[in-house]
């Protein structure tokens, strides 16, 4: 097993660990370790809310989840000799839940999926699902089931939702300006158009106290993906994947976290994956001058791993860029994917699921989303593919009509919606 350069004690909060990680992007956050090119190492990862979400039948914790504290990231890890303009090669050697532990922290034998309230982050379908809901998933032998969404079982596609390098000061300033300009177009929007720097709750590693206030006021939130990679939520970054990250600061300063047991394409409920803590084993190397050599001036490129479940039968739904009110939009692929998801939800409710159960399932299960046609004006076409093998009942259309399942206790809703 590779040396663990970032061990975590599950009994302690993230900000009380022996090595302190971070939850913001800034070039001045000190590395927790420096490794040579060609090194393999392990890092423990806390789930993104640091244990705030509980294994129970209430969604009050999702409703009240403190977005200003995420994500709890392992790192940064500096790679000796990496310089701006290089590409950092990162191989995912292994990744999984917290090994040999059962307990109250997500990753200790269980994980969760949440629909976020519109007033606290929202989601892909926040106008149709404005309140908070939750589903708990139990892990067994690489598969998962949920007491809140009965009738399904599937194999996890375990991956880090977030991994990336530190921005330069110039790149950070660019992020803050363009996102600030966007917020200014509609500053009172709910949910907001972007998340500005937020000093409250910032964890900045071992940064000295005299620098903390300045850096906390500048540091970027980790919620969106950006040029450095970041919170891309790509379900195919599994064991065996190789990622090539642009380097913007000396050492690269690689960070990782937000592990997922499984996820559908799009992570559509915002907390749409099966969130968990765990471990990840990485191998790092450098391509000198790789950004110019390969034309990778921004955003990572990657080679997905070959592991994970193999499904052979799918049920697919399509959508076009027409709103629920019948308004025509021009080649709006985002809207088309929303409509495809809504069609899948409508279909699954015919079997006895509530709309919220269906929505949570599509966020957690390994569905595939595709832009199927983006050139035929005025309608884009998007599709979502659901593997039929995950259901323990016949989900395909037939002459006898849909079977009616027992929906169980259902997906818990927050007691007092925000």
Image (cartoon, rainbow, N blue to C red):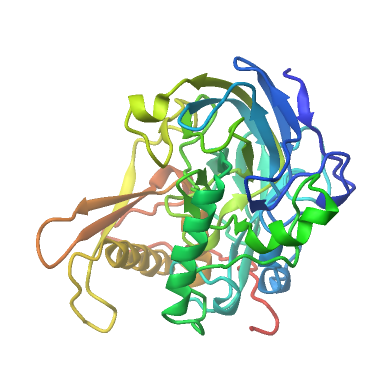
Q: Residue at x 62, y 65 (%)?
A: 197
Q: Residue at x 43, y 37 (%)?
A: 300
- Name the spot of residue 392 as percent of width and height, x first: 49, 48
Identify the residue at the far left of this view.
Answer: 376
Instruction: Check the picture and name the quadrant holding the C terminus.
Output: bottom right
Task: Work out whether 178 lies above or below 302.
Answer: below
- The quarter holding residue 217 reads bottom right
Q: Is there any visible trace of residue 188 in the rendered image?
A: yes
Depth order, front residue of 308/291: 291
Instruction: Check the picture and name the quadrant holding the N terminus.
Output: top right
- The quarter holding residue 85 reads top left
- Name the spot of residue 71 as percent of width and height, x first: 66, 53
Q: How many marks?
A: 0
Q: Residue at x 44, y 64 (%)?
A: 178
- Name the spot of residue 335 as percent of width and height, x first: 30, 67
**Horizontal side of residue 275 vs 386, given as left or right:** right
Depth order, front residue of 210/399: 210
Identify the residue at the far top of this view.
Answer: 38
Q: Residue at x 10, y 64 (%)?
A: 377
Depth order, front residue of 317/219: 219
- Name the spot of residue 407 as percent of width and height, x first: 56, 66
**Horizontal side of residue 347 vs 88, given as left or right:** left
Q: Is there any visible trace of residue 127 in the rendered image?
A: no
């Amino acid at each position: 097993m590779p040396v663990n350069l970032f061990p975590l004690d599950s009994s302690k909060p993230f900000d009380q660990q022996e090595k302190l990680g971070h939850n913001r992007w800034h070039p001045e956050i000190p590395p927790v370790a420096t490794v040579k090119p060609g090194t393999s190492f392990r890092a423990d990862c806390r789930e993104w809310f640091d244990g705030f979400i509980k294994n129970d039948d209430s969604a009050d914790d999702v409703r009240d989840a403190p977005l200003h504290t995420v994500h709890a990231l392992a790192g940064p890890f500096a790679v000796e000799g990496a310089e701006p303009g290089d590409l950092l090669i990162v191989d995912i050697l292994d990744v999984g839940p917290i090994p040999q532990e059962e307990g109250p922290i997500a990753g200790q034998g269980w994980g969760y999926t949440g629909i976020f309230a519109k007033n606290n982050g929202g989601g892909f379908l926040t106008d149709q699902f404005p309140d908070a809901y939750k589903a708990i998933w139990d892990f067994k032998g690489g598969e998962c089931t949920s007491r809140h969404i009965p009738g399904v079982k599937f194999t996890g596609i375990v991956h880090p939702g977030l991994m990336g390098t530190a921005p330069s000061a110039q790149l950070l300033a660019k992020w803050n300006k363009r996102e600030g300009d966007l917020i200014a177009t509609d500053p009172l929007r709910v949910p907001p158009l972007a998340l500005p720097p937020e000093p409250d709750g910032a964890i900045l590693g071992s940064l000295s106290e005299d620098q903390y206030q300045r850096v906390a006021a500048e540091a970027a939130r980790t919620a969106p993906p950006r040029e450095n990679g970041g919170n891309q939520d790509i379900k195919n970054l599994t064991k065996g994947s190789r990622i090539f990250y642009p380097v913007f600061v000396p050492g690269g300063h690689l960070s990782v976290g937000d592990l997922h047991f499984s996820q559908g394409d799009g992570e559509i409920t915002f907390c749409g994956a099966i969130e968990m803590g765990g471990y990840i084993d990485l191998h790092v190397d450098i391509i000198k001058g790789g950004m110019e050599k390969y034309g990778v001036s921004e955003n990572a490129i990657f080679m997905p791993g070959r592991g994970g479940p193999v499904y052979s039968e799918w049920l697919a739904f399509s959508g076009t860029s027409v709103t629920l009110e019948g308004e025509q939009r021009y080649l709006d692929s985002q809207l088309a994917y929303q409509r495809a998801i809504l069609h899948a939800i409508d279909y699954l409710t015919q079997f006895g699921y509530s709309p919220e159960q269906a929505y949570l399932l599509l966020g957690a299960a390994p569905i595939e989303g595709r832009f199927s046609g983006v050139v035929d004006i005025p309608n884009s076409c998007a599709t979502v593919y659901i593997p039929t093998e995950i259901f323990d009942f016949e989900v395909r259309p037939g002459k006898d009509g849909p079977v009616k399942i027992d929906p169980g206790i259902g997906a818990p809703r927050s007691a007092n919606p925000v």
